[in-house]
Amino acid sequence: MNLRKFQVSDSLFWGYQVILDINFMTNEKHLIEIVKEDMIQFFKSKNLLMLAEKIPHCQFHIPSLSKIKSSNDEIIYVCSHIHSCNCCKD
């Protein structure tokens, strides 16, 4: 197992965290979709349907999968602020 903690960095969803095994990830898009699906299921389970409905419209990005796999970062950020973000530069 190669578990990593992912945290959403977004004006509405900041702080949401999920721990994922990155050995099963095929690319960045796949990883983002898993994070988003986890968020949707969590918000639905808490009856926060309005929040769950917003998630499919979020445009998240992350560092490259190779960078994630080679880093020792405690937290990998899933960001939505593309224009002011330095977290994903290689």
Image (spheres, rainbow, N blue to C red):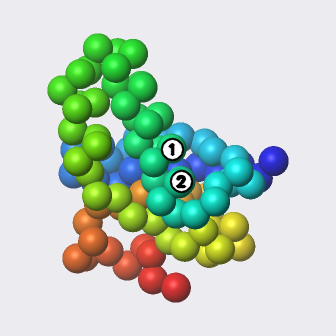
Placement of 89 over or under 45, stated as above or below: below
Rendering quarter of residue 41? top left
Query: Along the horizontal axis of the image, is 53 left or right of 33?
Result: left
Residue located at (29% from left, 14% from top): 47
Residue located at (60% from left, 68% from top): 65
Callout 1: SS? helix
Most extreme residue toward the right is 1
Look at the image and tell me whether residue 15 can be seen: yes
Q: Which residue is mark 1?
A: 34
Query: Along the horizontal axis of the image, is 37 left or right of 52?
Result: right
Most extreme residue toward the left is 50
Q: CA distance from mark 1 to mark 2?
A: 5 Å
Residue toward you, 15 or 69: 69
Q: Label 2: few (<14), some or many (≥20) within 10 Å?
A: many
Residue toward you, 41 or 85: 41
Placement of 30 over or under 87, stated as above or below: above
The image shows residue 51 at horizontal and vertical percentages of 23, 31
Q: Which residue is mark 2?
A: 31
Residue located at (53% from left, 54% from top): 30
Placement of 41 over or under 8, stated as above or below: above
Q: Are marks 1 and 2 in contact (CB under 8 Å)?
A: yes
Q: Identify which amino acid the numbered label 2 is placed on.
A: Leu
Q: Identify which amino acid the numbered label 1 is placed on.
A: Ile
Look at the image and tell me whether residue 7 can be seen: no
